[in-house]
Amino acid sequence: MEAFILIGITGIGLGALYFLIASGLSLIYGLMGVLNFAHGSFLTVGAFVGFWVASKMGFETTIPEFILAMIVGGLAAGLFALLIEQLLITRLYERHIDQALVTVGVSLVVGAVLGGWFGNDLRMFPTPMWFLTAIDVGGAQIPADRVIYISTAILLLIGNWALLKFTRIGLIIRAGVENRHMVDALGINVRKAFSTVFFLGGFAAGVGGVLVSVYSNGVSPLIAGSYLIYGFIVVVIGGMGSVPGSFLAAMLIGIIKQFANYYATGLGDFVVVILLAVVLLIRPQGLLGKVRA
Amino acid sequence: MNALTVKDLHVKIGESHILHGVTFDVPAHKVTALLGRNGVGKSTTLKSIMGLYQGTGSIELNGSQILGTPTYKIAQAGVAYVPEDREIFSSLSVRENLALASRSKNNGEAYKTIYELFPELDSRATQLAGSLSGGQQQMVAIARALLNENEILLVDEPTKGLAPKLVTEVASALMKVAHQTTMLLVEQNLALVKRVAENIIVMDQGRVIFQGGPENLSDPAWVHQMLGVSGGHK
C-alpha cells in the first residue's frame, strides 16, 4: 500500500512538472496556431535565471528565497518569450513551416549559447534543506519537494482559470481559441492577446524550469529536451487550447508513467506513447479539446 | 450619399479567382440586398469588405479606403458583420458573447435595444451559446453586431436553416434594425428581401450583373432569369 501511495504521489508530482510546460504550449497553439518548439528554451532560460538568483543566496536557500528565485525565473522566461514573439513570431503568423523552423532555431541557439557559457554539466540548484526531507502519507515516505511541484501546478491552474474566467483579456483568449478571425471581426486586436499568452506561457515554463532543475538534481542547457516532448504529448492528449485538459492529461501521464516504470520496469515512455495513440484514434481533439470551426 | 463603395474588386482564394471586378454602391441609411445563385461570390464579397479575404481594387467606407486594413480596424471603423454560419462562441455564455462584442462601457441603451428585439437573450444570459437552438444563435449573432454604433451592417443569410416561425422573428428584428442603420444583406428568402430592401444588387459568376430598385422582384420572369428561382414563393 505504501508503494502504491508513493508511486501515485510522485506520479502527480511529475505530472505537475509536465503541466507547467504544457499549459503555455496549449494556449499558444490553441489561440495562435503556433507550433512553438522554442518553448523548451523558455524553460531553460527560467531555470538558469532562477539558478542565478538562488546562487546569490548561498549554497542553501530558505523556502521564501527559493520561491523568489522561482518567480524571477518565471518572469525572465515570460519576458524572453515576449521578446521572441515580438521579434520573430509576429512576422510568421499563418506560416506554420517557417514557425517550426524558426522556433527550432531559437531553441538550438539558446542551448548553444548557454552551453558555451556555462558548459553542459549539471550544476547543483541551491534548494532549502526541507526539500531533502520526507513527509509521511499513509505510511509512505513522500519526498517533500513533490509538495512544491504539486502546489505550484495547482496555484498556476487556479491563476489561469481566474484570468481566463474573470478578465476581459481572458474572455478574448477563450473566444480566440475557438475562432480568432471572428474575434477580429468584432473589432478586437486579437494579437494583443497573443502577446499576453506568450508571456504567461513563458512564465509557466520558466517556473517549471526551476522545478525541473530541482527534480533533475541540477540545471543544465539540456534539461528541456524530454520535458518539451512530454509537454507536446500532454497538449495533444488534453486538447489544444484547453488548460484544464492539459492539467488532466499531465496528471494522467505522470501517474501512468510512474506506475508503468515500477510494475513493468522501464516501460513508462512506451505506455505513454500507447496512450497517445489511443487518444488520437478515439478522440482526436483530445480529452477536453473541442473540434475547431 | 454612399456609405460603401466597392470598385473593381478582385479576390483570389488559393488558385481560384472568385471575384472578377465587383463594383457596386451601398447608399447610406438604406437596406441593400445582395442576391444571386449559390456560389456566385456573395459571402466572399462580404468577407472581403470585412478584411477576412484580401483582394485588389477599392473598398471605401464613407469615402475612406478600407481595403488592406486589418479586420479589427475595419470593425472599429463601423463595419459590423453577421456571418453566414453565425460563428457565435459556443463555449462562452450568451452574456459573455455579448460582453466580448461590446467595445464601449456606456452601452446600457444598446443592451436595452437588443433585449427589446430579442427578449429571450436576457432570460438565457448564463446559458452556453453552443447549447442554443439555431434561431437563438442567430439572435446572438445579430445582437452582437448591434451592440456598437455602426456605419454599416453586413448580414449574411440570416434566415438560412431556420424554422418558419424563427424566420418571421428574425425578419421582424431585421426590419426594425433596417430603420436605424445602413445594411448590406445577403439573403435567399425573396419574401424577406421584398419587405426590407430598397436597393438590390445581383451577382453572377463573381461579377455584378444588376444594381437598381427592388421593383423587378415582382416580375417572375426577371427573377427566374436573374436568380434561377421562381419569384412567386421563394
Image: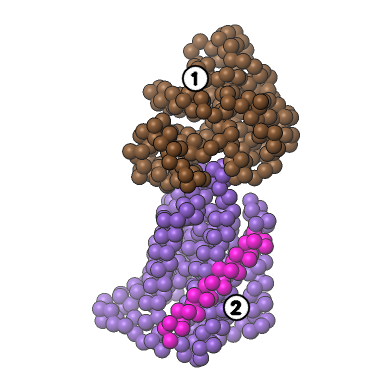
Residue A221: mark: 2
Q: Main secondary structure of the magenta part?
A: helix
Q: Which residue is at a point 70% across and 26% down the rendered structure image?
A: B23
* Residue A52 placement: quadrant: bottom right
Instruction: Provide the letter of the chain coloured brown.
Output: B
Q: Which residue is at a point 49% across and 87% down the rendered structure image?
A: A126
For badge 2, the amino acid type reads Pro
Q: Is B57 situated above or below A145?
A: above
What residue does disc 1 label? B192
Q: Which residue is at a point 63% across and 20% down the rendered structure image?
A: B202
Residue A24 or residue A189, whichever sits in front: A189
Colour of chain A, in one word, is purple
Q: Which residue is at a point 54% across and 43% down the rendered structure image?
A: A186
Q: What is the x, y in percent for residue B137?
A: 43, 36
Q: Left of B145 or right of it: where is A158?
A: left
Q: What is the x, y in percent for residue B63?
A: 70, 33
Q: Tell me where the magenta segment starts and ends, as one range.
A: A62-89
Residue B209 visible to the viewer:
yes
Residue A256 painted magenta: no
Q: Residues within 10 Å of mark 1 (few under 14, many from 20)?
A: some
For badge 1, the amino acid type reads Leu
| Residues beneath discs 2 and 1 located on the same chain | no
Q: Is B205 situated above or below B64?
A: above
- The chain to which mark 1 is attached is B
Residue B30 or residue A286, whichever sits in front: B30
Label 2 with label 1: CB-CB less than 8 Å? no
Q: Is B190 situated above or below B55?
A: above
Residue A262 visible to the viewer:
no
- The chain to which mark 2 is attached is A
